[in-house]
Amino acid sequence: MKQIYWVVLSILILSTACAQAVDVQPFVTGEPYGFWSGLWHGCIAPITFFVSLFDDEVAIYAVNNVGGWYDFGFVLGAGILFGGGSKGSRRRKD
């Protein structure tokens, strides 16, 4: 059973290398989003995801961003929303 798991996982990882890259420059307009926008977008990601299921105009992730700082804010915002991992670091009193 473990071998099948690793084979399927390997096929999935290798198939992602075949994904087509799309040029996003035609969609980039205005001022790019930075850290604070990424933080906000990370916090509202679950709501945005739900809305994006019904509206094609809504996206979870801003294409027009500054790169690493937007990504850091997005991950930090999503981590704040979901508790970040603080629950796992608590010590149990046995």
Image: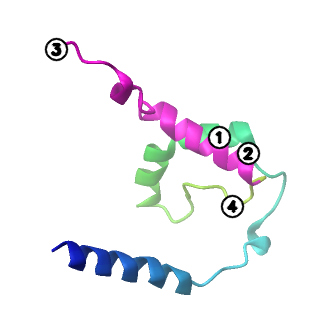
Q: Which residues are magenta?
A: 67-94
**Sequence order check: which comes first, mark 3 or mark 4?**
4
**Sequence order check: which comes first, mark 3 or mark 1?**
1
Cα distance in 3D space between marks 2 and 1: 6 Å
Asked whether the beta carbons under mark 2 and mark 3 sit within 8 Å of each other, the answer is: no
Classified by dominant secondary structure, the portion drawn in magenta counts as helix
Query: Does residue 27 sit above or below 61 in this rendering?
Result: below
Query: Does the magenta segment cover residue 82?
Result: yes
Cα distance in 3D space between marks 1 and 4: 14 Å
Q: Is residue 38 left or right of residue 78?
A: right
**Which residue is disc 4 drawn over?**
63
**Sequence order check: which comes first, mark 2 or mark 3?**
2
Q: Residue at x 66, y 55 (%)?
A: 62
How crowded pointer 3 is (Cα within 10 Å; few <14, some 14-19, many 20+) is rated as few
Cα distance in 3D space between marks 3 and 1: 37 Å
Q: Position of residue 56 (x, y in %)?
A: 51, 66
Asked whether the beta carbons under mark 1 and mark 4 sit within 8 Å of each other, the answer is: no
Q: Which label sits in the foreground, 4 or 2? A: 2
* Tag 3: amino acid: Asp
**Which residue is disc 1 drawn over?**
73
Which of the pair 84/50 is nearer the observer?
A: 84
The quarter of the picture where the C terminus appears is top left
Asked whether the beta carbons under mark 2 and mark 1 sit within 8 Å of each other, the answer is: yes
Query: Does residue 81 sit above or below 74 in this rendering?
Result: above
Q: Residue at x 40, y 52 (%)?
A: 50
Q: Position of residue 91 (x, y in %)?
A: 30, 18
**Which residue is disc 3 drawn over?**
94
* Tag 1: amino acid: Gly
Which of the pair 1/41 is nearer the observer?
A: 1
Query: Does the magenta segment cover residue 84?
Result: yes
